[in-house]
Image (cartoon, rainbow, N blue to C red):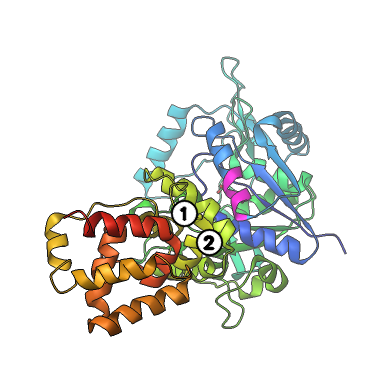
Amino acid sequence: MTAIRTRFAPSPTGFLHVGGARTALYAWAFARKHGGSFVLRIEDTDLERSTGESVETILASLRWLGIGWDEGPFFQMKRLARYMEVAEELIAAGHAYYCWATKDELEAMREAQRARGVKPRYDGRWRPERARAAGLAPPTDRPPVVRFRTPEAGEIGWYDLVKGAIAFPNAELDDLVLLRADGVPTYNFGVVVDDLDMGITHVIRGDDHVNNTPRQIHIFHALGAKMPEFGHVPMILGADGERLSKRHGAVSVTQYRDDGFLPEALVNYLARLGWSHGDDEIFSAAQLVEWFDLAHVSRSPAQFDPGKLAWLNQQYLKQADDARLAKLVAPALRSLGVDPGAGPALDKVVALLKDRATTVLHLAEAARLFYQYETPSPAKLAELVTERTRPALKMLETRLADVGWERRTLGETVSGVLKSTGLKMPELAMPVRLLVTGRTQTPSLDAVLELLGRETVLARLSHHLNND
Ligand code: GLU
């Protein structure tokens, strides 16, 4: 049995869209599952829209997601000589021919067709036998394109590994351009040459390419090559049923990274979006590789649900290693203008907060109170530090001066003060929170006290209680 080889072939015209990332993930998982290879190919033939920056973003996105490639990245623009060579082979075998039709001529052809009420298509006028019959001679003032001689009758089909049997009448396909006049291949030609040369056995891609596949199959046949299997993965839609786009919110992998999602959460979410393994919702990339099959890729489009992604991210944040999270939260804090060195050890803070955060950015927001003191407003102070609470606060200050500094004892100390003064928990906890953090919303008071440390807590209490 030949080893399985899949590929991901992005066009570097922007960021890596989550839809593209999911396609890459499926192709990667399929290769990994079968012990095969995953090839990365950059389809950079759109000279106006391709950029090196986009290549970098795509590679960084794949790396961040943990989708590693075994070969490549290969760049189509470095393979121009090869496409030329294959085009010449096809011409020699009578499967392709030169066409000198000008833009204006093609436009006039389409106009006339529209006027006759037929679908506009290239009429094959430069097929050599027709050109001869019509007395057309190759002009010398402009270079030709190379066109493929598409069979005119019959139909072309394949058994799609996701969608089942698909067929198109050949009459719907015209003689497509293989090589442009400047020698750059069109998408359909570059793909076939590359999939052949790279020994691709399974083409897994978005179903926006279903219409291209019959054209590609014709080229495979003309080259006498065994064609790969095809699996076309349905699109991802937004909540309104339209194709997922920027209108729906973040759609680039890098945006999710920057918004504080963990790569394993996004991988899990994308894997499950349009593929299923029973009722499993939370699974690792290793499990995906173990379980992945094209038979369980859904035939209908999937709907992107940001709420579910946020939920999954939360699950992964809860389980994530504290030191790892601290490394992610530190830069997020800095970008909020907060120095993560100006307070308790960040991994301890993260350990306290991670159960309730949805993203790394939320975690940073929540961690902020440990590093950035907010001076309480006089109004808030007057509201919470009253004749009733002041004695209890002073009592707490005194007792905290020599108590064991650890969460349980700190909790007991607070309870002891409540007992001695007859106050209710919120009556004491709220002003303490306000005095030691500047805020009234914080995590559990004993944990906050422990993390801030004795010195800071006592300094802040005394600052507000003993200066009058
Ligand atoms: N460059 C194509 C795209 O980005 C790849 C299509 C394919 O996988 O054949 O849509």
Q: Is residue 254 left or right of residue 371?
A: right
Quadrant location of the C terminus?
bottom left
Q: Which of 126 and 36 lies nearest the eye of the viewer?
A: 36
Q: What stretch is highlighted in magenta?
A: 59-65
The answer to which quarter of the image holds residue 420 is bottom left
**Identity, as a three-letter code, of the amino acid under mark 2:** Leu
Q: In this view, does 122 lie to the left or right of 78?
A: left
Query: Alpha-carbon neighbours of circle 1 within 10 Å: few (<14), some, or many (≥20)?
Result: some
**Residue at the far top in the pictured view:** 141
The number of discs equals 2
Residue 184 is covered by the magenta coloring? no
Residue depicted at 22% across the width and 60% down the height: 465
- Residue 88 location (% of width, % of height): 75, 32
**Identity, as a three-letter code, of the amino acid under mark 1:** Tyr
Majority secondary structure in the magenta region:
helix
**Residue at the far right in the pictured view:** 1
The answer to which quarter of the image holds residue 376 is bottom left
What kind of element bears circle 2?
A: helix
Q: Earlier in the sequence, mark 1 or mark 2?
A: 1
Residue 62 is covered by the magenta coloring? yes
Q: What residue is shown with label 2?
A: 266
What kind of element bears circle 1?
A: helix
Report if residue 256 is visible in the image.
yes
Query: Alpha-carbon neighbours of circle 2 within 10 Å: few (<14), some, or many (≥20)?
Result: many
Q: What residue is shown with label 1?
A: 256
Q: Which of 376 and 91 lies nearest the eye of the viewer?
A: 376
Q: Label 2 near label 1: C-beta < 8 Å?
A: yes
Q: Which of 366 and 46 lies nearest the eye of the viewer?
A: 366
